[in-house]
Amino acid sequence: MNSLKSQGFAPVVSHLKKDGSEWTVKEKLMLGLSPKEYWAVQLRNPFNWVLWAIYAVGLPILVGRFIYGLGWVTHSSYDYPWGLFLGWGLFVMVPLSASGFMMGTTVELFGRKDFKSIERLGLLNGLLGYLFAVMFLQVDLGQPWRLIYPMFVSLGPAAVLFLVAWHVATYLSCQVAELVPAFAEWMGFPKAKQFIKKIVLGLTVAGIILSTLHQGALGALFTYAPGKVHPLWYSSSFQWFQFFVSAVFAGLSMLIVVSTLTKWFMRWRCDETYLNNLSKLTLGLAKGASLALITYLVIKIIGIAHDNDWQYLASGWGAWFMFEMVVGVILPLIFYTMAVRNGNASLARFSAFLAVFGLALNRLNTALITFNWQLYQEIPHWREVVIVVTVYATYIVVYRAVLARMPILYTWKEKK
Amino acid sequence: MKKLHRRSFLKGGLVGGAAIAAVGTSKHAEAAGSFGGYPDSMGVLVDLTKCVGCRTCEAACNKEQGLPAPDKSFDDPSVFEEKREGGLPRRTTEKAYTVVQKYDVPGREHPLFRKVQCNHCNEPACLTSCFVNAYKKTPEGAVMYDPTVCVGCRTCMVACPFYIPAYSYSSAINPVVKKCIMCYDTRLKFGKPPACVEACPQEVMTFGKRKDLLKLAHQRISEKPDAYVDHVYGENEVGGTAWMYLSDVPFDKIGYDTHLGDQPIISYVKEFLAIVPMVLTIWPALFTGFHLLSNRKDGLKNEDNKS
């Protein structure tokens, strides 16, 4: 598409074509290309070849999971009831999607209108991340068709997961509402946009409350397993706060990562405002992320001091913990700070990749790698890995499809 | 000045205390502090020194609960040599709610056999972690599970400190948690001991009220201090369990986790649960306030423009 644009192709940015007639929905879905051109573009893209390969292997296995049961795709472990589906799909995806509430807060609540051009990308990153976390959950649940049971059939309100279920559900609707304006512009429903504008502050505050609690609750889920998670990754008092604060830097870092990817691979879809502001905004996000990182680092150290876990630092697990902290927290902290000081957006982008890696490592360490540290190490079944890759690929496909169409990376031009 | 006599103060205190007690018993006790267990709940005392590893209990459990036939027959001793991942001994599965493990203890004349099943905690981690309320602790002491509401999130398996609940992963249509229910439906409800207890030819297990069993356990230890280690496993572990154990070998040498602490698992989660209402009540005002503060300049500008 980038090369197409350099040849003079103009993507859809308003309801009207160059000749003054209106785009139909079908034409908008085809990105303003003729069907023949559209499919030719899809076929030419080497990334799509990779996706097809993933689906060729992954889809039959995903279907097989629902025909033959979880036992066919996992090791059916009683000792490790949670595997990669939740370890990656829930515990990594959700904090990386904290960008939604972060950007809502920055722009709508703190009135930083200068972040407006990246706000929608933050919101979309949040919405899709949560949506696919639920998809991963549906793959993992023994009886996915009972997903609404904790809501309406049999309630266990004293359980942490009850809070997660309710909050993720309400927050998903919250995020859908926050993105209605983008959809309304694209479809041409001005009233829907007006309505959301009236309630946006309420939505944003609700987003902060729900995010604080469910990001924290994901950490608190592990406080049910005090003897199973390694002490260096476990803190009865601070687990929820550690998960919440790390979600803040993770969400911001993921937004930097995604915006960098759009700058590289979807430049044709970005407008001038977005591209011109991106470096400045990247540094703004980097500043926020560095503040969250230093908070996180301090609360991690306090957690160790509070439970007096110092002696574990000298063990093999301690070395692994230090690796996570240095590569995933301290280095990004230093690089972010240097980037902000020197106005170096490229360094901030590199740092964002590190911070995202650090977050993922932390969650996988808590949920899988150090879990049952006194028993044995569980290596996921290959089919489990294939399903995770397949669902994640679908996340990327949907993400890319929305970015290519709706006014996320560009500003919609109203009629005339 | 009114005079408060000591006697009338005490009387008032008694009446008030009785009222609180009456109200307190009518509500669930888990709301505040920890729950010490139902007063007349039943339990089982397992004297590991008596077990010979005949696995009659396993066979009785299999029959009583209508479980599928085992891979190896119940009189095949080779199961004791089987190891699961990590070189760990056999554990409860979806096909076996109770299993006997063998431990070769250096210096001990015979190997030690250990029966494993759900310990039926006073304040069970599985119950408190379940978001659809599938678990129930009955006044008789059994921890029950309702497969008709279970979503299959398996948090109970993560939460159980004893690694007891198993899951029927093989089923695509109706996978459920599988664990010992102390034969509640068929026996405990009617005051009868669980099938495994009744079947044991060595009288390893004693069924009775938990509080009586505790007395019995300590009595046995004090009568034969050389024959037992001075610890009743399950008396206090994670808030106390209905199944309790006596042993002549230190418990940490025969696979028992002796670092679980005396607090029920839910007490580790309460620090988070306490902040939930705080966030719910404080955040709205706090962040709306931030919004007003950060937009104050715009408001002032507008006022200036008006005047």
Image: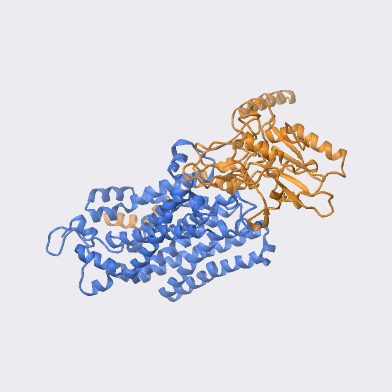
Chain colours: A blue, B orange
At x 71%, y 34%, the residue is: B43
Left or right of A84? Residue A17 is: left
Q: Is residue A361 visible?
A: yes
At x 74%, y 49%, the residue is: B102
At x 20%, y 65%, the residue is: A36
- Whole-percent x and y of residue A381? 52, 58
Q: Is residue B35 visible?
A: no
Residue A394 found in image quarter: bottom left
- Whole-percent x and y of residue A195? 28, 47
Number of on-image labels: 0
- Whole-percent x and y of residue B224? 87, 40
Left or right of A108? Residue A27 is: left
From this view, report whether residue A27 is shown above or below residue A353: above
Looking at the picture, tell me which residue is in the foreground, A407 or A51.
A51
Looking at the picture, tell me which residue is in the foreground, B205 or A306.
B205
From this view, report whether residue B301 is shown above or below residue B199: below
- Whole-percent x and y of residue B59? 67, 38
Looking at the picture, tell me which residue is in the foreground, A289 or B121.
B121
From this view, report whether residue A66 is shown above or below residue B215: below
Q: Quadrant of the C terminus of chain B?
A: bottom left
Q: Quadrant of the N terminus of chain B?
A: top right
Residue A367 found in image quarter: bottom right
From this view, report whether residue A318 is shown above or below residue A222: below
Looking at the picture, tell me which residue is in the foreground, B218 or B197.
B197
